[in-house]
Image (cartoon, helix red, strand yellow):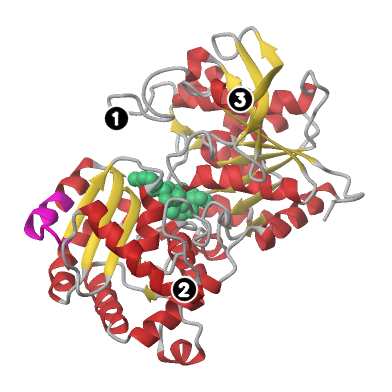
Amino acid sequence: MMVEAAGLRRVLSVASECVPLIKTGGLADIAGALPSAMAAQGWDMRVLMPAYPGMLDRIAEAAEVWSHPDLFGGPARILAGMAGTAPAEVPMLLLDAPHLFDRPGGPYLGTDGRDHPDNPERFAALSWVAAEIAAEGLSDGWRPELVHAHDWQGALAPVYLRYRGIACASVLTIHNIAFQGLTGAHRLHGLRLPEQAFWDGTLEYYGQISMLKAGLIAADRITTVSPNYARELLRPDFGMGLEGVIASRAGAMVGILNGIDTQVWNPEADPRIIPFNARTLKLKAQNRDRLREDFGLTHVPGPLAVVVSRMSWQKGLDLLPEVVDGFVARGGGLAVLGAGDAAISVALAGVVARYPGRVALRTGYDETLPHRMFAGGDAVLVPSRFEPCGLTQMYGLRYGAVPVVSAVGGLADTVIHANRVALDAGCATGVVFPQVDATGLSQALDQLCDLYAEPAVFRAMQRAGMKQDMGWRRSAAAYARLYEDIAR
Ligand code: ADP
Ligand code: GLC
């Protein structure tokens, strides 16, 4: 559907990571998939992100469309081009500013595992450039009518728009309120913002600067990545100090569930697995055997559960060592792929040593393995303490790996708990547990084992999950309504 006469059509999305160029978490999946879904609906989308090392070679027919002699301490330019392959191509604007982005380490952390010390300036510069493009346009004549910023790294874009008096609408999406872009007030001038922005309460957060708070105040609209997380954010236990700010902007806020890229995550046509669909579910057994080989799991008589996750307190993986004995005793097996917190990997490595052949761990980042894990796994575990949306439970649903999830955020919005009524109605898709601790998780794993022991019931759940519509159509329509609404 082409958008006609909506007024506003050109949208600049601003993100610190974006598939297919770089990913550390779900933000990148969404930063890539949402613009391509919106473009398919007729919106003129471009994505502004930093050119990290090696990235400039990865966009096709790059053309310089903007330059600046002094972007926060050094020269910068923007190269425009397409990333990825049709139909999931993303029109990219890569911000090439070597003094800010061309350095060893990841997008946020240095090789020593600590934040790059100038992260506030690096991402302020990204946001400043977004506002500059909105003010002046690019050399090819393109100028956005709306800036859609993601997380704290893009959050200053609406703030620059406001204090520079640039007429351009703005949306800020919260993917995770745990990351707030906090920094000392002494950096105010380095961020190229007027003192007024601090004293009027926009930037100021308990004497410091919060880049996310400032964006929440300045943006025309705020979205977050599930309706349930939008409600949770109003509570002190989820709002992480910003619940008051969120409450003050409640009228401008909406929760829109993320979709997944159903072409990349399509069990019927995934080159990394033995393809299958809801009618040929028995082929999952072959994928399961391959997965056991991949992880060196010898014999798993019960459900084989997988985890693909950042290792952090958020994800609740520290609960696994406490519950694994009971799960293994009931025949379960576990394959974990994770990167992050070393203490969590050390604890999990201890479990692997106790149950070789039944529990296995891979640390690091791997693009292929998750596909094989969801295809081969009977279940996917996501015991998060909070989860704005969560993507791996959706990948699991699509690949017939039954999700076992805590009842938070987008997990509760995407998985239907296997209670008696839902099972009888044929709509149950997983196990949703309310109590996020070892007792809650171990009860959930017990229920998983009970369900797995009834093959017909378990297959019905797998099929119900595989049929669920998780593509972008509905969510893209919700974003379109939002964009159109701001234009009015
Ligand atoms: P978050 O963004 O909080 O990390 P999500 O569930 O939204 O959580 O997204 C995580 C994304 O990163 C998913 O696409 C998941 O498959 C991927 N992922 C997480 N850990 C790894 C890893 N170690 N290797 C490869 N992909 C990973
Ligand atoms: C964040 C959240 C995750 C969400 C992702 C994409 O990283 O932790 O729950 O799925 O962003 O929106």
Q: Exactly how many numbered labels are in the figure? A: 3
The residue mark sitting in front, 3 or 2, is 2
Q: Earlier in the sequence, mark 3 or mark 1?
A: 3
Q: Nearer the viewer, residue 328 or 237?
A: 328
Residue 280: give its label.
2
The answer to whether residue 240 is magenta is no
Task: Tell me where residue 99 appears, x and y as whole percent.
Answer: 49, 12
Q: Identify the image quadrant of the N terminus.
A: bottom right
Question: What amino acid does circle 2 point to?
Answer: Thr
The vertical placement of 468 against 457, above or below, is above
Task: Name the residue carrying label 3.
Answer: 94
Picture residue at 42% right of the left edge, 40% below the top: 24
Look at the image and tell me whether residue 63 can be seen. Answer: yes
Q: Residues within 10 Å of mark 2 (few under 14, many from 20)?
A: few
Task: Tell me where residue 211 appears, x and y as whole percent.
Answer: 53, 35
Element carrying mark 2: helix
Residue 20: give its label.
none
What's the CA distance linking mark 3 and mark 2?
43 Å
Question: What amino acid does circle 3 point to?
Answer: Leu
Picture residue at 74% right of the left edge, 45% below the top: 39
Tell me if label 3 and label 2 are in contact, CB under 8 Å: no
Picture residue at 65% right of the left edge, 38% below the top: 90
What's the CA distance linking mark 3 and mark 1?
25 Å
Task: Tell me where residue 406 appears, x and y as whole percent.
Answer: 37, 68
| Stretch in magenta | 348-358
